Amino acid sequence: MSLPPLVEPAAELTVEEVRRYSRHLIIPDVGMDGQKRLKNAKVLCVGAGGLGSPALMYMAAAGVGTLGIVEFDTVDESNLQRQIIHGQSDIGRSKAESARDSVKEINPLVEVILHEERLDNDNVMEIFSGYDLIVDGTDNFATRYLVNDAAVLLGKPYVWGSIYRFDGQASVFWAEHGPCYRCLYPEAPPPGMVPSCAEGGVLGVLCASIGSIQVNEAIKLLAGIGEPLVGRLMIYDALEMQYRSVKVRKDPNCALCGENPTVTELIDYESFCGVVSEEASAAALGSTITSKQLKEWIDNGEDIDIIDVREVNEYEIVSIPGARLIPKNEFLMGNALQDLPQDKRIVLHCKTGVRSAEVLAVLKSAGFADAVHLGGGVIGWVNQIEPEKPVY
């Protein structure tokens, strides 16, 4: 589906801009007119992480006139494996400021606007209203639905991407011309069903593959060239080196962009996506211990069974002394329950406490009333008890 250009062209290109963008200008589909539209465009990138890094760098190189960056986090060493907009010297710095400096180094002609705050219901409409196009580089479902709903309510298109391990997806959602994200995913997956990249990992270069697709789509939308991924979902399998495209139709019953919408304003996205299930929250209430408490139990020789519910590769990176590994799925399938001791208090832990809370709910319902889980998980343990150990 060909669409009209999203922005009007700027009045002119300077001699410096002509020299810089000459390889664009000699492409008939882009030319002077398309490059002037890029110059006049205002694009907001939500996140300066795995997807935001290549997206911002290539949009800057392409000559997008104004780039907004929404980012509240700081650069961590674990980011550097994939977030190529940051470097070793940026560790501990604001990601937004680090990204801005990299963008300016790539193209000083680009104006960069920083929004160093967490995107939420209170600020999203005001922030989005100042831009022509949104590029979504988020990594959690609550923010994805927030971005989608705000874009639809404001009538703005956005380019979406998602990455996990070796798999990536990308699409363009624009309710005026096709489906929105809710048409594809009406409901968020159950809490804990889809691991985050922090839990499951991601191949670093996959970010470049999907991020470059996002920029490609952004350029097409801004300049009005080619056929954007509106109504199509691009799926990439890096292990098999396969791309495939799936049609996504506008859902007439969509709660947001359908014929009789029930979502007409922003909602509570944390509750909608259920970061932790109600069962897990109830189980964890009064049954959550701290790292210092666990250390005391270990030192005092308490009769406990410490069970790590992460995956094998996570356990190999770092573990709590005395913990044995039983992955979460073993509990969800019911396979692990028969091997649990009846004469010891069970202490569950995962990376940060989310997965262990879900397993705790399973154990509570199976009659292990005195089972507990470790708040903050192994990350909290390392930070408070064994800081010499690595984190991930």
Image (cartoon, grey):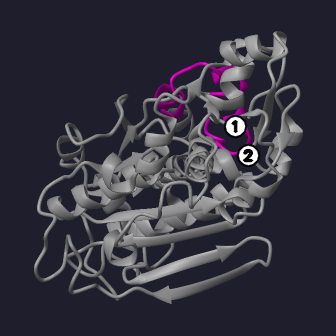
The residue labelled by disc 1 is: 348
**Position in image of residue 216 (x %, y %):** 50, 67
Closer-to-camera residue (122/375):
375
Amino acid bearing label 1? Leu
Q: Relative to 177, is 364 above or below?
A: above
In what element is the residue under mark 1? strand
- Residue shown at the point (83%, 32%) measured from the top left: 319
- Dots 1 and 2: beta carbons under 8 Å? yes
Tell me which segment is drawn in magenta: 76-100
| 88 within the magenta span | yes
The residue labelled by disc 2 is: 309
Reading the chain from its start, which is encountered first: label 1 or label 2? 2
Quarter containing the C terminus: top right
**Position in image of residue 47 (x %, y %):** 46, 43
Which of the labelled discs sits on residue 77, or is there none? none
Quarter containing the N terminus: bottom left
**Position in image of residue 345 (x %, y %):** 73, 32
Q: Relative to 339, is 198 above or below?
A: above
Amino acid bearing label 2? Val
Closer-to-camera residue (298/105):
298
The image quadrant of residue 160 is bottom left
- Res. 87 in view: no
In screen coordinates, is 148 left or right of 337?
A: left
Closer-to-camera residue (187/285):
285
**Position in image of residue 223 (x %, y %):** 34, 69
